[in-house]
Amino acid sequence: MGRGGWKGRGGRQQADIPSGDDAAAWFGGRLPEGWFTGDPEVTVDREEIVIIGELQPLTGEYADDAARAAAEDGRISRFREETRDERIEIARQAEHRYQRKVAWGASLGGTRHLFTTHSAPVMTRLRQPERLVLDTLVDAGVARSRSEALAWAVRLVGEHADAWLAELREAMTKVDDLRSQGPDLS
């Protein structure tokens, strides 16, 4: 198959997926003025691009935090409905350009909502000790299935290893830069 096509049982080959390095800039230039208070947060992985923007602040007075949270929730809901058609068109263009699904979200004050996100299956082989960890999480009611337990464990590691993961990503970027500067052997 051509670029971005499926390659046997393993799915897409990473080399076939266009780089998403310029996605934040592309969305920054493509999004309508006034949607967000600044540049949106754009996160790219192999399967999905997530765009989350901060909406204009509320101006009203609210009796308490619960009323403010309800107003924030309502404003985000209104944004979602009013921008749906245009977000779909922008996502269609981005999916063609980057060969990834696009998900949207908005935040306002202390409220943050993702509208539609992609859930990608991940194949892994676990030995019994790792399976026992997942089964303990299921048996304890922390998760409903091994799949949910694994997702929970990944989130937990991500929360507690942010600095290390950021360093690792930075090192990977340096490796990519060096690889691109390597000698041309063609």
Image (cartoon, rainbow, N blue to C red):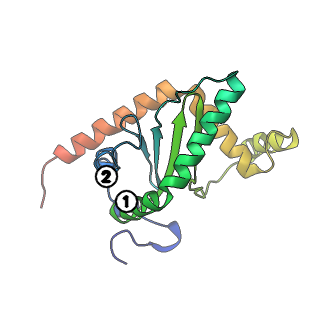
- Residue at the image position 57 percent from the left and 57 percent from the top: 120
The image shows residue 100, relative to residue 79, as above or below, that is: below
Q: Which mark is residue 63?
A: none
Q: Which residue is mark 2?
A: 30
Residue at x 48%, y 54% (from the top left corner):
83
Mark 1 or mark 2, which has the lower sequence index?
2
Cβ–Cβ below 8 Å for labels 1 and 2? yes
| Residue 167 visible at all | yes
Of residue 102 and residue 169, the one placed in the foreground of this image is 102
Disc 1 residue type (three-letter): Ala
The mark found on residue 94 in the picture is: 1
The quadrant where residue 38 appears: top left
SS label for mark 1: helix
Q: Residues within 10 Å of mark 2 (few under 14, many from 20)?
A: few
Residue 159 location in percent, x, y? 59, 29
Q: Residues within 10 Å of mark 1 (few under 14, many from 20)?
A: some
Q: Amino acid at mark 2?
A: Arg
Quadrant in the picture for the C terminus:
bottom left
Q: Where 48 sits versus 55, above or below?
A: below
